[in-house]
Amino acid sequence: MKNARTLVLAALTVVLVLAGGLAWRLYGRPAATPAHPVAALPRFTAAAPPARVPAPKPVVLAELRPPCWGCPEAEKWPVQFRTDLDLLAPLGDGATNAALWLKDFARPVGSRLAEAEAAMKRRVEGRDGVGLVLPPEDPLLREAESWADQSTMRFYPHVWALEGFSTPIPNLLVALSFARSWVERARLHPDSPEALEDCRRALRWGRLLRQEDVTVIQDLIGLACIRVGADEMYDLARRRGDQPLMLAAAIVVGEHAPQRLRTAQSLTRVGLAPGDMGRGALEPNDKLVDEVIGIARNDPDRRFRLEAITQLAFARSKGSREQKNKAENALDSLLSPPRSEADAAQARWARRVDVRELSRSLE
């Protein structure tokens, strides 16, 4: 019993560290220190194209199976939902990349950053701990609705290049505020037909943010959007006596915490302290370098592979001769097909970066 309690406390500690790093990235300082000035990108002026959002798949109670994230086989699962999210909120079929719109609010040089900052000042405290939300008819919130109906959200390399710890990221505080605000709007009018649509919108938005699987921080924000949408959908289904939808939403909510924990575990395995742009990197040792190489080559989740690849830049610079050779050989192997272009781009960065110069830029 004592050992079990120790394991639970250790797991909770990892999750709290991850949550602290997430808050630091969102509310503290900019998420990355660019190796060179970030060029301002032109504003995306086109409107979101019309989109069709299909109805959710029917929930068949006999087919619902809560996944066992605590079972041994789960260690090999990607850190993704095992439950089909089309049961709650299928993606729309809009043909424009939603990242082209969302990137305009990015720090430090987004063309609409001033609008984003003004919108964040309009937020008020939502109910039941949902956080700060925009007013129900806020113009920016209304504008975001049609972008949640698009089928894709891809930032890399469509908007930005991958540059290790200096990789730019979208304004995730704005992105999270949209999902929270839609959920709060559903709470204000729970008997309205639009309430479920707002929950589905928050879920679709989270799915879009997770779609790319490139940065851990964006994935976590997407996961949070899905959680708040499914949580409110559960309450609405309970209120309406829709037991199949209620159960499906409950299973999705139950998958949130295991994915956060697995994310924290994956980051600690590669020696990262979340959110500090590499200052948490451990001094290389043989066991750590071998484990990081294994993650960089084989992890089923791309974001964890890319995090591990950035760590190989430190092993290449700060490790022993043998560790340096291992790291360089691993990076070279990632440059060849059939590796993904994202893996190769991150490996090119790790192969050329001057870690001493990088460390100075992070001071």
Image (tube, helix red, strand yellow):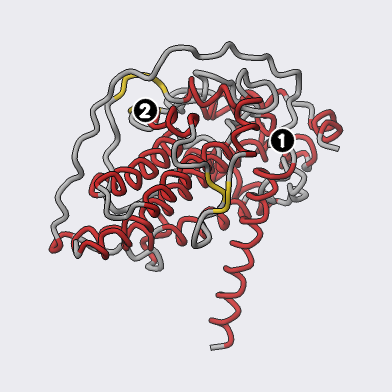
Horizontal and vertical percent position of residue 82:
32, 53
Tell me the residue that label 2 is attached to: 146
Question: Closer to us: mark 2 or mark 1?
Answer: 2
Q: Residues within 10 Å of mark 1 (few under 14, many from 20)?
A: some
Q: Is residue 353 left or right of residue 57?
A: right
Under mark 1, the amino acid is Pro
> Please, what secondary structure does the residue beneath circle 1 have?
loop
Front residue of 183/208: it is: 183
Horizontal and vertical percent position of residue 323:
71, 42
Q: Is residue 149 left or right of residue 302?
A: left
Front residue of 227/81: it is: 227
If you read the primary sequence from the N terminus, does the residue marked by circle 2 or circle 1 appear first?
1
Under mark 2, the amino acid is Ser
Total label count?
A: 2
Horizontal and vertical percent position of residue 271:
68, 51
Horizontal and vertical percent position of residue 352:
71, 23
Q: Quadrant of residue 296?
A: top right
Tell me the residue that label 1 is attached to: 30
